[in-house]
Amino acid sequence: NAGVTQTPKFQVLKTGQSMTLQCAQDMNHNSMYWYRQDPGMGLRLIYYSASEGTTDKGEVPNGYNVSRLNKREFSLRLESAAPSQTSVYFCASSVDRGRLTGELFFGEGSRLTVL
Amino acid sequence: AQTVTQSQPEMSVQEAETVTLSCTYDTSESDYYLFWYKQPPSRQMILVIRQEAYKQQNATENRFSVNFQKAAKSFSLKISDSQLGDAAMYFCAYRGVQGRFGAGTRLTVKP
């Protein structure tokens, strides 16, 4: 019972490099999310997808792009990584359709370091 | 915009004792949900308890219970009979039209 799976778990990048974080869920959830976690700031929403084919900006979208590839998969791309993007990234999903008020199910997180 | 405030960056409790973690939020919505998540050192986010805003009765899950004061916009978490395994970061979260997480409270449990 995998739940939400995100890869890679760890990544070190140099400033200016690009990378994609992959996320897949096997719970047939409608909504998917990308958060970043920084010390003292909790989790902040980067982008979300309320349904297949739609994506919307969250609190901190600058420097990121997303793709909802299908109902299962939601990827996060850093086109030109910056040291300020050093963080732990979490993918999450919820069953919600429409109003996003349900329980979030999280992946194990990906630690990204940008040198 | 909604905000969620956890005013206690760190808390400690003696094993078997009770501890309360505070959370306040700001919203103009009437229909929303509140959650407490636990994050142990493994980094995995685990749901502890949830509360629907339209329900007056406080949610409970075994040793975990909440004190939900809608008018005061307060949502505290009480952990009874604390165990070593309760040591973790605890995040309060609001979900409505928008969602927000608090900054977290690090709970230490002393044997």
Image (tube, rainbow, N blue to C red):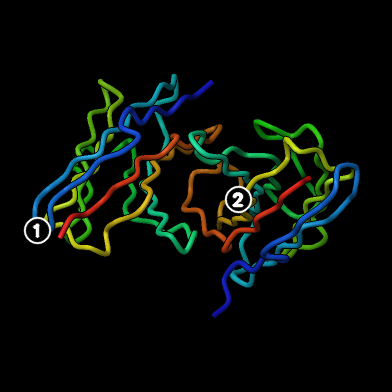
**Residue B77 rendering spot, x and y as whole percentages:** 24, 43
Gap in angstroms between the C-alphas marked 1 and 2:
41 Å
Q: Residues within 10 Å of mark 1 (few under 14, many from 20)?
A: some
Callout 2: chain: A
For the point 48% across and 38% down, the residue is: B95
The amino acid at mark 2 is Arg
User: Among all residues in the image, which is located at the extreme bottom?
Assistant: A1
User: Where is mark 2, residue-wise?
Assistant: A97
Q: Quadrant of residue A5?
A: bottom right
Residue placed most toward the observer, A64 or B65:
A64
Q: Position of residue A72 (x, y in %)?
A: 72, 66
Chain letter for the residue marked with disc 1 in the picture: B
- Please determine if labels 1 and 2 lie on a single subunit: no
Residue at figure coordinates x 78%, y 32% from the top left: A62
Of A9 and B70, nearer the camera is A9
Residue, disc 1:
B16
Location of residue B58 by image quarter:
top left
- The image shows a total of numbered marks equal to 2
Horizontal side, residue B103 vs residue A16: left or right:
left
Residue at (39% x, 51% y) in the render? B37
